[in-house]
Amino acid sequence: MKKLKVLIFGSSGMVGKGVLLECIDSVDVESVLLVNRSPIDIKHSKIKEIIHKDFTDFSSIENEFRGLDACYFTVGVSSAGLNEKKYSRITYDLTIAAAKSLINGNKNMTFIYVSGSGTDTSEKGRIMWARVKGRTENAILNLGFKYTFMYRPGYIQPMRGIKSKTALYNSLYVVFAPLYPLLNKIIPKHLTTTEKIGKSMINVSLRPYPKRHLSNNDINITASINY
């Protein structure tokens, strides 16, 4: 089976770092290209990192995007304290700028976008972040990639020492960490981990999943596939 050449946006964040670690460990991933605003603290022979400050314009590095098999877009922020214009700029504008740069030479690639549980693809609901996420999902699905998957995780337990950049979230993860094994037995369909998200992305890039919108349950199912 062909080994994957992967691009990750957002590898300094909780989800992105989890995905990166799984890509490093996976025998199915040949190389990992990272696009970040500042360097990460992980070095490996598989990794090539590009420091790029302007996430609204990737034209200067588009040549680096040739020949990729998959893109895992994990950039995201909380909507707390942001109005719709500011949240849209980060959530919609940056994502679509990256996707449009990629589609130019990679129509056969798999593009995976980390969205969120409760996303509103009608774009008309009362919850601001859900509307913006829905608009982003719709735009990606209409760009013309061979395969696109919208990951809609609910609760994510960080693993392998990974921490969230948000202090409040870190506090919650510390509280829930001892309870996770029990909760995973009681409500496994509603929980996932950074490890499972990474494994799932690799697996659906190798063999596409029939659904385009993946919940925590779908993520867990695809994470356990053995090729």
Image: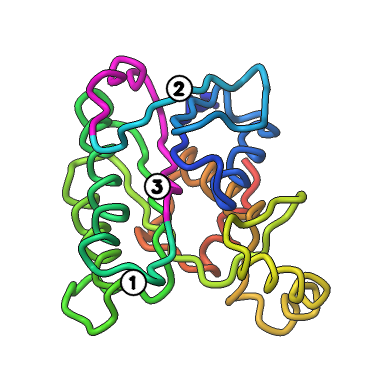
- Of labels 3 and 1, the one closer to you: 1
Residue under label 2:
50
How packed mark 2 is, by other alpha carbons closer than 10 Å (few <14, some 14-19, many 20 or more), is some
- Sequence order check: which comes first, mark 3 or mark 1? 3
> Which residue does the image show at 52% across and 72% down from the upper left?
154
Asked whether 23 or 163 is in front, the reply is: 163
| Quarter of the figure with residue 176 | bottom right
Residue under label 3:
112
In magenta segment, residue 26: no
In magenta segment, residue 58: yes
- Of labels 2 and 3, the one closer to you: 2
Q: Is residue 26 above or below residue 116?
A: above
User: Mark on residue 82?
Assistant: none
The x and y percentages for residue 216 are 54, 68
- Sequence order check: which comes first, mark 2 or mark 3? 2
Magenta-drawn segment: 57-76
The x and y percentages for residue 138 are 21, 59
Q: Amino acid at mark 1?
A: Thr
Q: Amino acid at mark 3?
A: Ile
